[in-house]
Amino acid sequence: MGESFFGEISKVFEILSGCLSNSLRSLSIGGSPEKGYCFTGQIPNDIGEFKSLVFLSLVYHKISGPIPISIGKLSTLEVFYIHNNQLNGSLPKTIGSLSNLQYLDLSYNNLNGPLPKNLGSLSNLESLSISNNQVNGSLPESLGSLSNLKHLDISSNHLEGQVSEVHFANLTKLRNLLAYENKLSLKVSLQWTPPFHLHEIEFGSWNLGPQFPMWLESQTNFSTLDLSNTGIADAIPSWFWNLSTTAEIIDLSQNQIYGEISYMDVASDVATILILHSNNFTGSVPRISSQIIVLDLSNNSLSGDISHLLCHPTTHSNNLIIFYLNNNLISGEIPDCWKYWPLLAAINFNNNNLTGKIPSSLGSLGNITLLFLRNNSLEGSIPNSIQSCSKLIGLDFSLNKLVGTIPKWIGSLVELRLFGVRSNKLNGFLPFELCALRSLQILDVGYNKLSGTIPKCFKNLTAMTFQPQNRSSFYPFTRNGQYMDSTVLVIKGRERQFDTLTDLVTYLDLSSNIFVGEIPKEVASLQGLRYLNLSGNGLRGSIPDKIGNLTWLESLDLSMNKLSGKIPPSMSSLSFLSYLNLSYNNLSGRIPTSTQLQSLTPSSFIGNSLYGPPLTKDDREGDPKTTHEHESSEYGEREEKADQDYWFRLGISVGFGVGFLGVICPLLFCRIWRIAYFWFFQEYLWYKILDCFIKIKYTLKT
């Protein structure tokens, strides 16, 4: 059928009925909804009249309604593909009459209800896919009689209940078993040996524990093993790591697996993804074999340093691409041995106890796209070698003890989409080179000692000027369709974790620094911005009149500054705004009228000279200046401390200059002064000291 076909699917069968209904053997119509080429409507009941059909494929359309009961009349049908549609209702029992059926794919629809118990009568069935539906109830025991079945995919449904050895009794040819994201429980004896040898084993979200499933020892040829979130509370058996030479993905995450692992010597001959996050592993970080390309050990209780892993080269080149150790108890310094890991593209060491400086050898990682070292105790400055990492997309050094300035070379990382240095001890100005980062979506420099004015060139941050579109994740690493990236942002005064950072996240936080001057009117050009926080600075002037241009803004915090004037009327057009804080400024006048502004709490406006809803008379009778001084004391203390630091450094400099010029220089360049100086100490002062010492000694003897 041509691409120009669209409309009701029933029209197709109406056209083909008559003389073709008894002779048509194959019907395949592939749609493309995104291009507008697809059929809609329901499959007609008279589909049962096409009794010669052997192959029927109606995929990627918008076909809705139930599968008609008359489908059971297609006794010669061998292949039935109708995945990626909008079918609903339950599977008709008549589908069990298709005795010649070999391939059945109903995935990605809205089918519900239980599976027919007579599915076991499809004796020729080789492949059954009903994934990503809403099928519920228990798994029929009759599935165990499908002796020709090779591929079974029941993943992402609402199946529940127990699965026993009976369900697999005759599945000797089964090679792929995909059953994750259901609420099923496997209850088999400890001595059970499965009749199959699987290539794909995916039981994620089943109940398999608490013991480690011993039947896995017979599965020596798998490529994918997913036992995530299955209630296992046991140690990994010694035989496990040498189980399969073809293992590509091993996922044991989100369990309670415990114990120490000294060496992960995976026996696989192919590149292996190893996901062990969210368990109870203890001890030091294990050394790994060179076949591992992804290692996720995050959210465990691993401790000690990691030099034994990173700084001892193996005979084979290391192929590790992704290395996640975040949320552990790792301590010590980050080793300066990154030259041995040239393929690394993502490093996440967030939330550990790392100390010392950021090693300069990280700059040798030419493929690195993600570098997260958030919430440790790292010191020193941001190393200049990082500028060599030209592929960086995400860089987060927040919640450390870094000093110095934000380097100007940051503008050379043109692919950067996230830059976070929140809660450090950085000072100086925001470099104008930041404005060259046209892909930057998240800029978080809050809680430092940065000063100066907000750059007007922020209007060049192109990614924040466009309306957000949910196109893709930050990082191109996926596991079962899930992106392996996350970060924490402070929104509405609370930390919020984003597990998947897409183009929808646009964030600018300059809060709690020492910025002065006015809010540049150019900020209003960041029309794609969703979260803006400039609170806790010394900003003066008025709120930009065109602040209403930030149409996607959800959170705006300008509190604890010295802003004056009226609230711009354009702010009433911010229809997505759910959090606003203008408190403790010098704003005056009536609060603009809009559904969004009047639905906010009075605390969003207190500490000013504002009136009108949502402020009440009691709110206005308070002393905003006194309260402002009290609530903004944090900024005042930071400003006072900055002044003290300034005069302290100035005093040291002046003292050094006076001492050097007034004492050292004359001694160096004036011979008479030099002779007099040493004569004073040697001939006069020294004999005076000796005379005093002799007198004291004589007095003590008498």
Image (cartoon, rainbow, N blue to C red):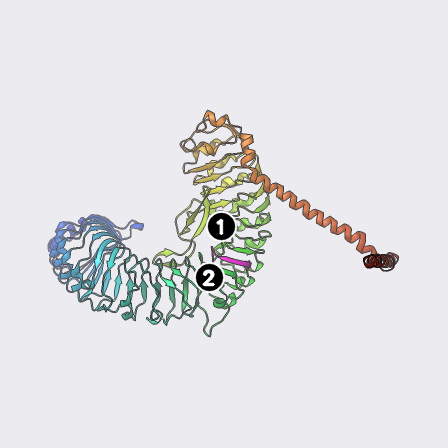
User: x, y percentage for residue 501?
Assistant: 42, 51
> Of the residues under marks 2 and 1, which one precedes in the sequence?
2
Say the numbered circle drawn on residue 440.
Answer: 1
In the image, the segment drawn in magenta is: 346-358
In the picture, which quadrant includes the N terminus? Answer: bottom left
Q: Is residue 242 visible?
A: yes
Judge whether residue 351 is colored magenta.
yes
Task: Find disc 2 in the rendering and name its residue.
Answer: 303
User: Dot 2 surroundings within 10 Å: few (below 14), some, or many (20 or more)?
Assistant: some
In the picture, which quadrant includes the C terminus? Answer: bottom right
Say the numbered circle drawn on residue 216.
Answer: none
Q: Amino acid at mark 1?
A: Leu
Residue 79 sits in quarter:
bottom left
Residue 319 sits in quarter:
bottom left
Task: Find numbered disc 2 in the image and state the secondary structure of the residue it sits on.
Answer: strand
Q: Amino acid at mark 2?
A: Ser
From the viewer's perspective, tell me whether residue 17 is left or right of residue 470. left
User: Dot 1 surroundings within 10 Å: few (below 14), some, or many (20 or more)?
Assistant: many
Residue 192 sits in quarter:
bottom left
Q: Residue furthest bottom?
A: 315
In the depicted structure, whether residue 574 falls above or below residue 308: above
In the depicted structure, whether residue 323 falls above or below residue 397: below
Q: Residue furthest front?
A: 702
Task: Find numbered disc 1 in the image and state the secondary structure of the residue it sits on.
Answer: loop
